Image: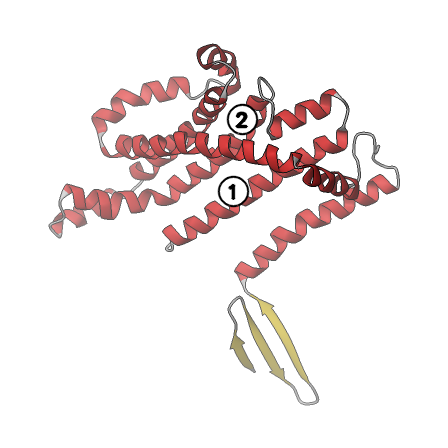
Amino acid sequence: MRATPLEHGVLVRVRGTSAEKVKFHLGEHTRRRLLSILSPLGLLVLWQVLVMVHVLDNRFFPTPTAIVVQAYHDILSGQLQNDLKVSLIRIVLGFLAGAIPGVILGISMGLFKPLRVVLEPIVASTYPIPKLALLPLIMLMFGLGETEKVVIILLGVIFPVLINSAAGVLQLDKNYMEVAKSFGASRKDYYTTVAIPGALPMIFTGLKLGAGMALLLIVAAEMEGASAGIGYRIWISYSVFQITDMYVSFIIMALLGYIFSLLLDEIEAWVVPWK
């Protein structure tokens, strides 16, 4: 038997007495990627078949092909690009506005006990409040402009990022600090070389949760006081019963979630190669 390693798999040549068999074994990483692509494709095929055989009512569940045609028309008219651009700007601004202070505050709470004692009760009491319940208050405070939409996303992002960042630092083995001290590391060295790198996996977990919250909240924020955006398009499509257009917006949101997840996975694999 001879095995030839490839980048994402292994080519295996099995020598037998009468014939040779050549098998291609996919690597674990490639297998996962393929399954992650094939599983949604399989769902779309099943959806198409169920509508065509009238198991699903096409008034409420248009076929994926009809949705693709509608998306094509939306692209030609420029509507889809405009909605996507407006929503992406709001999502990115809100995500950064919540994630950056969330990471800084979370790591600081994990490293400095006095700060943790002061902020922990505030975080514990405000985190359970549903962020959508705060929308009327935010609208009163900031009006129905861009700031209101960024703030509601900020509130949805900052808590999961902060809590996971703090937990990432707190769960580090205390022996690491003793080892660092025994090698003469200063407190600053311990923070930069042990505490923060050790907390990175949990920080990325918080960022992924925050990205999901940003997508959830942008739809709700754009349903009120917006004239463009994916959430606005969902609400308008529902109001005039343009169900196919509404599904186009649903799929765009699903794609955004998938792309954000892949992007964060790639960044995490680069920043935290030991995970």
Badge 2 or badge 1: first in the primary sequence: 2
Residue 275 in sight = no
Q: 10 Å neighbourhood of mark 2: few (<14), some, or many (≥20)?
A: many
Please tell me which residue lies in front, 55 or 235.
235
Please tell me which residue lies in front, 142 or 29.
142
Q: Picture coordinates of residue 251 (x, y %)? A: 66, 38
Compared to 193, does 224 lie above or below?
A: above
Q: Picture coordinates of residue 249 (x, y %)? A: 66, 33
Q: Which residue is at the far left? A: 184
Q: Tell me the residue at 53%/19% (across/down).
A: 132
Residue 169's disc is none
Q: Which quadrant is home to the N terminus?
A: bottom right
Q: 10 Å neighbourhood of mark 1: few (<14), some, or many (≥20)?
A: some
Amino acid type at mark 1 = Phe
Q: Picture coordinates of residue 193 (x, y %)? A: 23, 48
Residue tagged 1:
260
Q: Which residue is at the far front? A: 77
Compared to 204, does 86 lie above or below?
A: above
Q: Tell me the residue at 30%/30% (across/down).
A: 105
- In the picture, measured across the screen, residue 158 lies left or right of residue 243, that is left
Residue 217's disc is 2
- Mark 1, secondary structure of its residue: helix
- In the picture, measured across the screen, residue 66 lies left or right of residue 142, that is right
